[in-house]
Image: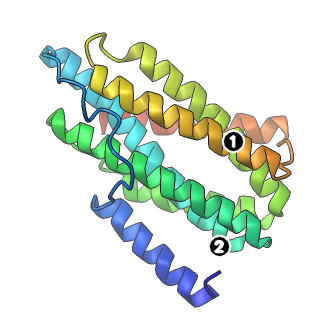
Amino acid sequence: MPDPIDQLIIGFDRALRTLSGTATAARPNPAGTIAAAELTPEERRHAAGLMRVNHTGEVCAQALYQAQALVARDPEVKQCFAAAAREEEDHLAWTQERLSELGDRTSLVNPLWYAGSFAIGLIAGLAGDRSNLGFVVETERQVEEHLSSHIDRLPAGDSRSRAIVAAMRDDEIGHGMAASAAGAHTLSLPVRALMRATAKLMTLTAYRI
């Protein structure tokens, strides 16, 4: 594992790539072979709003995993976070590419969400590795619900966005299962409720701004 200074440098580089829009995917875009459909202006705006929310969610995921890995004690737990972060970077690139195709932009408040998520990740990590992993399990469970709802809410003809969201959901399920298998603690009800309220605020904000 990198020493603390190297971890900080790696983290700073990841933050720059996340917020500057230069993240790259290691895996092919799930929408790569799907033909683009004709969408009405209203459908295009709605699809872009949902994909902007998903992109902001991936910005938050990068910050969370980076912070959690930074303070995790067990090297295997650090590796778990690092592997998940690499897959989340694919999601980041895929959603940004889809937003470009839709002729829209990423959220203007992503830097604030990144900073806030990094702080939350540090707090979760400092509570101990099992609580740290429990935070991942609950986060991914809520993200899975959120992505499933987006599949239902996307325009019927927008198969490209649907393919991306479905692939993201499969990965999130895997991340939650891996964290659970690694010994995650179940978070308390108030913590889970606070996480859900924060996610709701992010969703409402990113859809429009």
Residue 102 visible? The answer is yes
Label 1, secondary structure: give it.
Answer: helix
Q: What element carries label 2?
A: helix
- Residue 179 sits above or below residue 156 on the image: below
Q: Position of residue 103 (x, y in %)?
A: 14, 36
Q: Residues within 10 Å of mark 1 (few under 14, many from 20)?
A: many
Horizontal side, residue 109 vs residue 79: left or right: left
**161 lies above or below 153:** below
Callout 2 environment at 10 Å: few (<14), some (14 to 19), or many (20+)?
many
Q: Identify the residue at horizontal 31%, vertical 10% (top origin).
A: 156
> Which label lies toward us, 2 or 1?
1
The residue type indicated by label 1 comes to Gly
- Residue 93 x %, y %: 33, 50
Q: Which numbered circle lies on residue 176?
A: 1
- Looking at the rendering, which quadrant does residue 175 occupy? top right
**Which residue does the image show at 34% across and 61% down from the upper left?**
19
Direction from residue 65 to residue 124 in the image, left or right:
right
Q: Mark 2 points at which residue?
A: 70
**Residue 45's spot in the image, x, y percent?**
22, 24
* Residue at x-position 69% and y-position 67%: 78
Q: Which residue is drawn at 19% across and 16% down?
A: 42
For marks 2 and 1, the one nearer the N-term is: 2
Nearest the camera: 157 or 68? 157
Toward the top, the furthest residue is 156
Report the amino acid beneath label 2: Leu
State which quarter of the image contains the C terminus: top left
CA gap, disc 2 to disc 1? 19 Å
In what quadrant of the picture does the N terminus appear?
A: bottom right
> Quick check: 100 left or right of 203?
left
Q: Can residue 116 be seen here? A: no
